Image (spheres, helix red, strand yellow):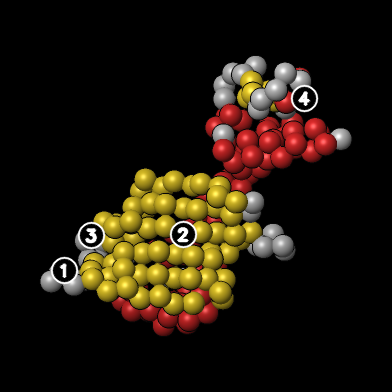
């Protein structure tokens, strides 16, 4: 019984330390966890590894769809985008001016939601839109996905890094719990 518990712990560790194992195109590849007992060897086709990879793919697909909606809402000046943020979210701006002055500002999700509602009409009036490129999705924990991208702002004409963390709630709703933006003015 003790050996089965150790194998289970190694299985969980293997999913986090060697996540690419489940993405291997060679299903006969084995991950050796030590010992001579056949219970300590896992094939990448074993259900526990396959289930993790399929779950990761599902999470990434869900977040990809949500991020496409996020981009559309942003560029259509839809202030209901505020509903995508958790009240407890940590929103961080790194602001760089033409004189190279850099300041950092942080807001809670609740405050940022109010800012969005007030800022959307101004953004619409100016035609301020963004294009995202080099988008990367990474499952960083159970029901948590990090998005990293480059964001081009068409009004101010600059490119800067963008990242956010989305978490799936117990009700199945995805919410932005952290967002980091770099803004040039």
Indicate which disc, 1 or 4, sits on the residue closer to the N terminus: 4
Return the residue at label 4: 39
- Residue at x 18% of width, y 72% of height: 101
Q: CA distance from mark 1 to mark 4?
A: 59 Å
Mark 1 against mark 2, which lies toward the viewer? 1
The foreground one among 28 and 37 is 37
Residue 53 image position (x, y, % from top left): 63, 37
SS category of the residue bearing label 1: loop
Please tell me whether residue 180 is drawn above or below residue 143 in the rendered image. Answer: below
Say if mark 4 contacts mark 3, CB within 8 Å: no
Task: Looking at this view, name the residue that lies furthest to the right.
Answer: 1
Q: CA distance from mark 4 to mark 2?
A: 39 Å
Disc number for residue 164: 2
SS category of the residue bearing label 2: strand
Q: CA distance from mark 4 to mark 3?
A: 55 Å
Residue 12 image position (x, y, % from top left): 68, 40
Q: CA distance from mark 3 to mark 2?
A: 19 Å
Return the residue at label 1: 100
Q: Quick one: label 2, few (<14), some, or many (20+) residues within 10 Å?
A: some
Residue 154 image position (x, y, % from top left): 26, 61
Residue 61 located left or right of residue 114: right
Q: CA distance from mark 1 to mark 2?
A: 25 Å
Indicate which disc, 3 or 2, sits on the residue closer to the N terminus: 3
- Residue at x 40% of width, y 64% of height: 180
Say if mark 3 contacts mark 2, CB within 8 Å: no
Mark 4 against mark 2, which lies toward the viewer? 4
SS category of the residue bearing label 3: strand
Q: Quick one: label 4, few (<14), some, or many (20+) residues within 10 Å?
A: some
Return the residue at label 3: 158
Q: Is residue 64 visible?
A: yes
Name the quarter where the N terminus is drawn: top right
């Amino acid at each position: 019984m003790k050996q089965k518990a150790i194998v289970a712990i190694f299985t969980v560790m293997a999913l986090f330390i060697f996540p690419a194992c489940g993405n291997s195109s060679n299903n006969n590849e084995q991950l050796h966890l030590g010992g001579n007992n056949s219970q300590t060897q896992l094939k990448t086709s074993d259900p526990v590894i396959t289930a993790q990879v399929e779950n990761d793919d599902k999470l990434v697909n869900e977040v990809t769809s949500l991020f496409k909606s996020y981009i559309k809402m942003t560029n259509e000046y839809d202030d209901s985008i505020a509903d995508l943020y958790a009240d407890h979210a940590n929103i961080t701006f790194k602001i760089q001016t033409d004189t190279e002055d850099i300041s950092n500002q942080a807001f809670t999700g609740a405050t940022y939601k109010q800012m969005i509602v007030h800022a959307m009409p101004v953004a619409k009036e100016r035609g301020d839109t963004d294009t995202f490129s080099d988008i990367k999705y990474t499952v960083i924990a159970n029901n948590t996905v990090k998005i990293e991208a480059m964001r081009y702002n068409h009004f101010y004409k600059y490119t800067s890094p963008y990242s956010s963390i989305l978490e799936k709630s117990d009700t199945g709703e995805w919410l932005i719990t952290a967002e980091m933006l770099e803004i040039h003015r």
